[in-house]
Image (spheres, helix red, strand yellow):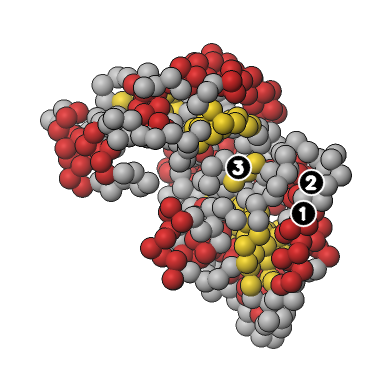
Amino acid sequence: MCNTPHPTLQPANSRAADYAHVWHPYTRRSTLRDEALPIIVRGEGCHLIDAEGRRYLDAIASWWCVNLGHGRPEIITAITRQAERLQHSILGNLTHPGAIDLAGRLARLMPTPDRHVLFASDGSSAVEQAVKIAIQYRANIGQLQRTRLACLEGAYHGDTLGAMALGYLESFHKPYRSHLFPAITLPFPDCRPDCGNACGADCFTPARNILDEHADSLTAVIVEPLLQGASGMRIYGEAWLRALARWCREHDVMLILDEIATGMGRTGEWFAFNRAGIDPDIVCVGKGLSGGYLPISATIVRDAMYDTFSDLPVDHTLQHGHTFCGNPLAVAASCAALELYENGVIAGVSAKGDRLAKALEPARNHPRVANVRSLGLMTALTLKAETTNSTGTTLPHRIRRRLVASGVLLRPLGSVVYVMPPLVIADDDMQQLADGIISALDTP
């Protein structure tokens, strides 16, 4: 059986079998030999538990998606009940109650409910759908010259080819550069996250100058709102996002927001764009949509765009879809997760975020820390440049290993050590997490 370790395999044998056959994402192969990987067999609340019974605090919500914690009976029950009735059914010329329910719920979470929802299985696919919809929309209405897309420098929108073109990170994607379509890149906003434009400076000017130059050929701009994740948890201000939304509206350019990491309450609101008070044209969601229990994502599109994809008198059907689009099990998990988010979880995020930031405040004065920043229930520390030690390992890597040994799981992004725990994390777990990080900063 694949859901539990084979009874004859001890942890050492399991690790050997893992090394022989499992390709670990975003993982240096040397680390697979240097350290004994935890073999996770169970999840409970904010903890993962390995085959030897050790508990680990899941400080990054298992890549930013298990927002509601592990083992929630409400979600497990919803999946189980759905599995007894219907496990899968395509959405091509068919439908099912769960897809209808979830699409309606997502539409009603938007500033106006006049939206249609195209489901997929992961964040990259949701972004790819958004890009294809934006491009074909222009063709549908006869604006064939408007085919270009703009994105932010340092963005990350996934690892499929289209998503890479709009979120090119040299350290991730260099071998594929020649295969990516050219995008217009805007400079990362040079503004404080809490500015609110109180300083009177127009931080949007550098981006505006570039956008003005390409306004006639642009179909859409895509950004991660307020928080860039994979490039180092970089935060920018709401005023900049509002200025971008205003420019897009004035120039009939679609605004696509990648809320895959920031959505579902991470910033203290349902979506990061709610903090800026804007109304995007397309919103991509994923990760925490199902609470991280099953793969599902969605592309939420204005009806004004959807209505151009009719087939009469000319066929403009969107010839795009995924096998597991709107899978009933994933949809059931998502509907249960949305109810949990709505019933108090999101309302408590801002206070929890403040407590986490306060607990990590002592790190600001550590000689190895360049800066500390927070947004919602996310806090990140950028470490000062430092040479590797005598073992040849970097400080972030050594910090990660020390924390694993103490029962905390996280994964630095280059020189950035960040925490993005489940939204339901308890105060004592937050304090343990903060104390562990501050102590680990002194790692030799």
Q: Amino acid at mark 1?
A: Phe
Q: Quadrant of residue 147?
A: bottom right
Q: Which residue lies under the disc numbered 1? A: 204
Q: Residue at x 36, y 34 (%)?
A: 388
Q: Amino acid at mark 2?
A: Ala
Looking at the picture, how far across and down is residue 425, in whole percent?
Answer: 55, 23
For the N terminus, the image quarter is top left
Q: Nearer the viewer, residue 142 or 309?
A: 142
Q: Which residue lies under the disc numbered 3? A: 234
282 relative position to 50: left or right: right
Q: Nearer the viewer, residue 295 or 89?
A: 295
Mark 2 falls on what kind of element? helix
Marks 3 and 1, how far apart in space?
Answer: 17 Å
Extreme residue in the bottom direction: 313
Q: Which residue lies under the disc numbered 2? A: 239
Mark 1 falls on what kind of element? loop
Q: Residue at x 19, y 28 (%)?
A: 11
Marks 3 and 2, how far apart in space?
Answer: 16 Å
Looking at the picture, how far across and down is residue 211, in whole percent?
Answer: 73, 66
Q: Quadrant of residue 312?
A: bottom right
Relative to 360, residue 98 above or below: below
Extreme residue in the top direction: 428
Looking at the picture, how far across and down is residue 303, in whole percent?
Answer: 73, 64
